[in-house]
DNA sequence: CAATAAATGCACTTCCATTGCATTGGTTAT
DNA sequence: ATAACCAATGCAATGGAAGTGCATTTATTG
């Protein structure tokens, strides 16, 4: 807990009760979450606060957005030494068509993608869809 | 024109004036379009009709959706022999951060992506963002 | 403690996607 | 040709998520 506080401060984020709770919530989750997920987890809190908290986390590069194709943006904590600031999100994401959950495959980096002449690649979003380990039953 | 009609019929899509126009519109466009793009191109037509036409095209596998991360879904005609039915969208998409347009790079197939044990990959969505050939000035 | 700035909460707005239902138009069977 | 039928269209309304303005509360700083 103390560690989280220090971490947030080190990232230039003021510590508040709400922010600590949301950070903890994200840290405990193994999957990417939607704003509604957070909303449901903290019925008492206002949606706007949650929204702006996530945006703050995003700006300070401790959270990254994931567009998994469902149309609803999801969020997940960045890994240690993730360096979102420099190049965005090198790892790929997996979206389960069965349980509908999306997870970061942080170990799986995105391969180099060739683009035609004249095109400049700045960053890459790669989402694999299928059946996750929990749902595939092994 | 006659050819389009026959094509639609071959795909089990009834030919109507609107559908022909929308098909032609898509065929002439070099880029993926939003519903609003179509809406603007056909001021007279109702938004719902355009929406349902696109959905019909999608169901019949002559159009595919593209989620380029902008939050607005885009659509593009499938290539000849695209086989969306079987495995979705093997080619990658490019989204230009400058002109905001998204195009199909149908020549550029998505490489095989490894996923961890227990995960089953059913399909892959790959969007590269950067500067397109027109905007990069060559 | 006073002054100031940031965080929170509430209300409202916008934008896109989607649906229900009445109407129109085209197809098929009598 | 007419009636019966079904699909396509148009209009209105809804829903969901994202985002903004402003007043209020809470934290910081001098
Ligand atoms: Mn991730
Ligand atoms: Mn495409
Ligand atoms: Zn699953
Ligand atoms: Zn461009």
Image (cartoon, coloured by chain):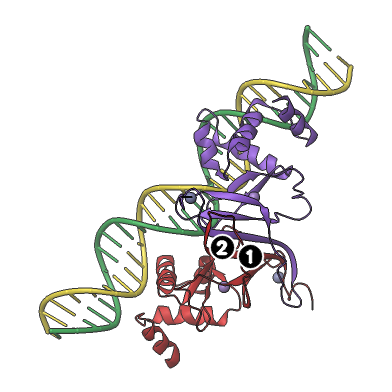
Chain colours: A red, B purple, C yellow, D green
Q: Which residue is mark 1?
A: A127
Q: Is residue D24 shown left or right of residue D8?
A: left
Quadrant containing the N terminus of chain B in the rendered view: top right
Task: State left or right for residue A54 relative to residue B63.
Answer: left
x then y, percent, for residue D6: 77, 31
Could you classify mark 2 by the number of other residues whose Cα lies within 10 Å: few (under 14), some (14-19), or many (20 or more)?
Answer: many
> Where residue B58 sits: x, y (%)?
69, 44
SS of the residue under disc 2? loop
**For marks 1 and 2 on the same chain, the one whose residue lies earlier in the sequence:** 2
Query: What chain letter is assigned to the residue under label 2?
Result: A
Which quarter is ligand 3 in? bottom right
Q: Quadrant of residue A29?
A: bottom right
- The Cα–Cα distance between marks 1 and 2, rounded to whole angstroms, is 8 Å
Front: mark 1 or 2: 1
Mark 1 chain: A
Q: Residue A125 occupies which quadrant of the picture?
A: bottom right
Return the residue nearer the eye: B129 or D23.
B129
In the image, farthest residue toward the bottom? A2
Do residues under tags 1 and 2 come within 8 Å of each other at their CB atoms? yes
Q: Which residue is mark 2?
A: A67
């Amino acid at each position: 807990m103390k560690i989280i506080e220090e971490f947030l401060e080190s990232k230039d984020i003021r510590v508040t009760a709400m922010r600590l709770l949301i950070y903890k919530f994200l840290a405990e989750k193994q999957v990417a979450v939607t704003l509604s997920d957070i909303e449901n987890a903290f019925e008492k809190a206002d949606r706007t606060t949650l929204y702006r908290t996530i945006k703050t986390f995003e700006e300070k590069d401790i959270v990254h957005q994931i567009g998994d194709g469902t149309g609803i943006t999801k969020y997940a904590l960045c890994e240690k030494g993730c360096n979102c600031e420099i190049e965005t999100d090198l790892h790929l994401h997996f979206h389960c068509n069965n349980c509908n959950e999306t997870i970061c495959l942080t170990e799986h980096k995105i391969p180099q993608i060739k683009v035609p002449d004249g095109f400049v690649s700045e960053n890459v979003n790669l989402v694999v869809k299928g059946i996750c380990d929990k749902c595939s039953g092994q």
